[in-house]
Image (cartoon, helix red, strand yellow):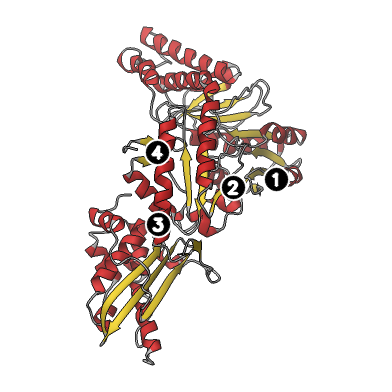
Amino acid sequence: MDKRFVYADNAATTPVSQAVVDAMMPCFTDAWGNPSSIHQKGRQAAELLRGARQSVAQSLGCRAEEIYFTSSGSEADSWAVKGAAFYMRRRLGRRRIVTSTIEHHAVLNACAALEREGFEVIRVGVDEMGCVRMDELAAAVNTDTALVAVMYANNEIGTLQPVAQIARIAHEAGALMFTDAVQAVGAVPINLESLPVDMLSLSGHKIHAPKGVGALFIRRGVSIDNLIDGGGQERRRRGGTENVAFAVALARALADAVEALPDMERVVELRDRLIRSLCAIPYSRLNGDPHNRLPGNCNISFSCIEGESMLLWLDMAGICASTGSACSSDSLDPSHVLLAIGVPHEQAHGSLRLSISHETTEEDVSYILEQVPAIVERLRAMSPLWENGHPVQTKQETECKVKYAIQ
Amino acid sequence: MQYSDKVMEHFTHPRNVGEMPDADASGTVGNAKCGDIMQIFLKVENDVIVDVSFKTFGCGAAIATSSMATELIKGKTLKEALQLTNRAVVEALEGLPPVKIHCSVLAEEAIRSAIADYYRKNGREIDFPLESALHEDEH
């Protein structure tokens, strides 16, 4: 096949769609007012903001007054986790947070910050498919628990969590339930009328809106502390002049994503074709659950090679992807998610995440499937861990030389 | 993170890559857990490195530093090869991103390890450190 550009890193970010650009542009050129102003420019902006909030609510099956726009998914995560924790401790004296070992860093690091503030954080493990161990979670949630925070779908391996079931466990103990749905919104159907969570976060740039906008759903009647104090914006719960253009963009992107949900069946077929063919490469393994996973997520480890080298070759072939290898970050440890599901360090270094979308075509997948095996073979040929078509047995691994870590 | 053209050139066209069946000595450093392993093979005549090759498991910088290091010691005496610093490898590659400096250290140590193996096999005393002289504060 001729060289082509294939973007298979949609879990990292997505291009802004033309429909979204078209929807937000008038907010810069015409409706640029401050929604808090009483004059016509203010009213015009306020009306657009109201419409955007209403649209987001409709896409998620909740009320408009339950949607709060934020600057990102991370802000929504941080607000939900810290806001709930501080409120519940002050009002009810509860000081335990229950979360999972495979959360996004936005949640993990918010929990770590709470630990320094005297909260007790229980990180529940996952099984080899990446699903939260429900018995451990049920045992960890008690009447001292302020918040249970478990993601809807994992960003690296795509595993979907039994969020409704977890929420029921949280509620039985009188705790709040928050789910980080940044990867799930727009990829799987979510209806907040039936999903019993108290809070849910989403991000614009994962669904073809710009970077710099997210939202937090806070169910009516649920109180949490503010993260950003300020004026009376967002029903006095999140200060800062509203980013009307980006709220409009998020609303448009979400509505389009929800409308396109039936097309995810096709994406699932493409994903399964990727998984089947790449797993046919000797000494490879699928990371995550073969069925219970995000429609666009394919995460595979190839023994004896390292992920960044794969990415460099793929990039030269025009394919954008990502890896859980430490070498693509500034830490010595590979992905905490891959380690949590029991992938050995050396195989975690050789992981490749391809995240496709409704924009991905059969031809794109064929091209990926043409390129990847050749790259794996080329890198294995120069790997000291690989000999005559098989991995060589290596001696017991020792600790990494931390002294070479760069600040 | 951006690699120099030189790094990418050595990554895509690595020199002296592959196993050397008739090697006089070899050395391996790093481990799979950390994500990089370098193996260097030497052919030595009259204390001169007449041939050298490598096998590397690791990132782009690990492969490029291995390739460059083998180029820099080919045809040199063992003594000269022991003078090779990680910094010289970095300079020859027109720089490495800060998080990748450890790859150049690994390359230096892989050479030291291979020469030590040669000394051992020839009953010579290993009168040089196996570790790079690079200290943390030099990063």
**Mark number, residue A133:** 1
Of helix, strand and loop, which one carries label 3?
Answer: helix
**Mark number, residue A117:** 2
Q: Earlier in the sequence, mark 1 or mark 4?
A: 1
CA separation in Å, label 2 and label 3 = 47 Å
| Residue A287 falls left or right of residue B42 | right
Residue pictured at 72% horizontal, 34% vertical:
A165
- Badge nearest the viewer, 2 or 4: 4
Relative depth, front residue between A265 and A108: A265
CA separation in Å, label 3 and label 4 = 19 Å
Q: Earlier in the sequence, mark 2 or mark 1?
A: 2
Q: Earlier in the sequence, mark 3 or mark 1?
A: 1
Q: What amino acid is labelled 2 in the image? A: Glu
Q: Is residue B115 above or below residue A48?
A: below
Q: To which residue does mark 4 refer? A: A367
Give yes or no for contact between labels 2 and 1 (Cβ–Cβ under 8 Å): no
CA separation in Å, label 1 and label 4 = 38 Å
Q: Chain of mark 4?
A: A
Q: Is residue B94 above or below residue A141?
A: below
Categorize mark 2 by other alpha carbons within 10 Å: few (<14), some (14-19), many (20+).
few
Q: State whether discs 2 and 3 lie on one chain.
A: yes
Residue B136, quarter of the rendered image? bottom left
